[in-house]
Image (tube, grey):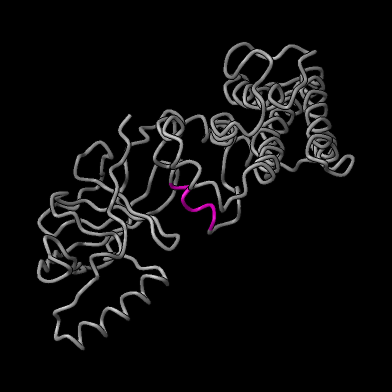
Amino acid sequence: MASNMASAKRKTNYARLGQAAQNELPNILRELLLIKEPPNLLHGHVMQNDDLKKRLRNDDMLKIQRVANNNGYNGFDIPLMYTLIRNLKLVPPPTQGWDKNGPTPVELTIGDDVERIRRIRNEILHRGDADVDEDVLAVYMCTFKEIAGRLEAYLGKQNNEFVSQIESLETCCMDIKTEQMYLDNLKEIVESEKLDRKKLKKKSYLRRETIKWKQGSILGIGGDKSQCYQLCNYEMHSGEVVPVYIQDDYDMPDTLNIDDGKLQYGMNDGIFFIVYHDKNLKPYQHRFIQNENQKKAYAVNESLKALTSGAIDLSWTVGDQLRDFKIS
């Protein structure tokens, strides 16, 4: 009986570490990002940084493209935030450099703590042992509180704003349902990191659409093209569901691979989508989705076309072409 209770206690301790890795530590990094890199600037800064773009997965780019339209950095995990902080040079590097040796106990710069957070997160996820005794938990919690206190001071936060969250986690009563949720999430994160990140799984069929665009026109005169697409929803490994336009004469496979040379993506008005097609057709992404400025431009253009019996058509000047996926 006593042995079972002790085992349950150690399991709960592991769940507490899981909560820290999934909630408290990421929340601290999100606050750092919010102050150092406003969400509305992130996508532009990433696109200007070739080294950073090479390091980002396609699902990371999806989150980055959506960040200005969503809830800030909610949904960004520690690995992604670490990559952004490091490559955008938002803080000075750790004393011993990024991703080299772990910081020593006396190395306490902001870069050292960002490095600590990443290493602690990975350590918790890949322990391979769900039994955490009281002494081990106490060491982790002490480290968490020290990091939280230093980040409070660095970011100009109220005293105990971060530390109190760690203290609450250390002592709060954790019910069985909450405990199991964090344990399951830990297992899911570990498994997801092993999955093929280049696969998209078909979820549902939506409808058939005809897409029109200009190609080979002279000042917008002539060059009218069209192509029919089957619109489906596909799920990325991250769980994000995205619309995929599949060219009419192509199969609608249960699984798509980003390595396939026929896949491209677009982003407009905060909506990410994928096109599976013959890239030689070069359809403009605004033919799929238009933002407010593009809608106004098209309204003006339609008036010009009507007044000139179609002699003037400048729709080819509006929009942005689809992009290739990064293959790594």
Q: Quadrant of the C terminus?
A: top left
On the rendered structure, is 258 left or right of 238?
left
Answer left or right for 96 relative to 146: left
Counting labels gives 0
In the image, residue 122 lies at what x, y percent?
59, 24
Camera-side residue of 240 and 59 = 59
Q: Quadrant of residue 120?
A: top right
In depth, the one of 291 and 211 nearer the eye is 291
- Residue appearing at x 24%, y 70% in the figure: 315
Q: Nearer the viewer, residue 232 or 13?
A: 232
Residue 115 shown left or right of residue 154 in the figure = left
Give the residue at x 17% y 85%. 308
What is the quadrant of the N terminus in the image?
Answer: top right
Q: Does the magenta portion include 63?
A: yes
Horizontal placement of 161 versus 65: left or right? right
The span picked out in magenta is: 62-68
Could you tell me residue 307's position as x and y percent? Answer: 21, 88
Give how far across and how far down residue 42 sits, in percent.
Answer: 54, 46
Residue at (25%, 68%) from the top-left corner? 207
* Magenta segment main secondary structure: helix
The outermost residue toward the right is 159
Q: Is residue 234 highlighted in magenta?
A: no
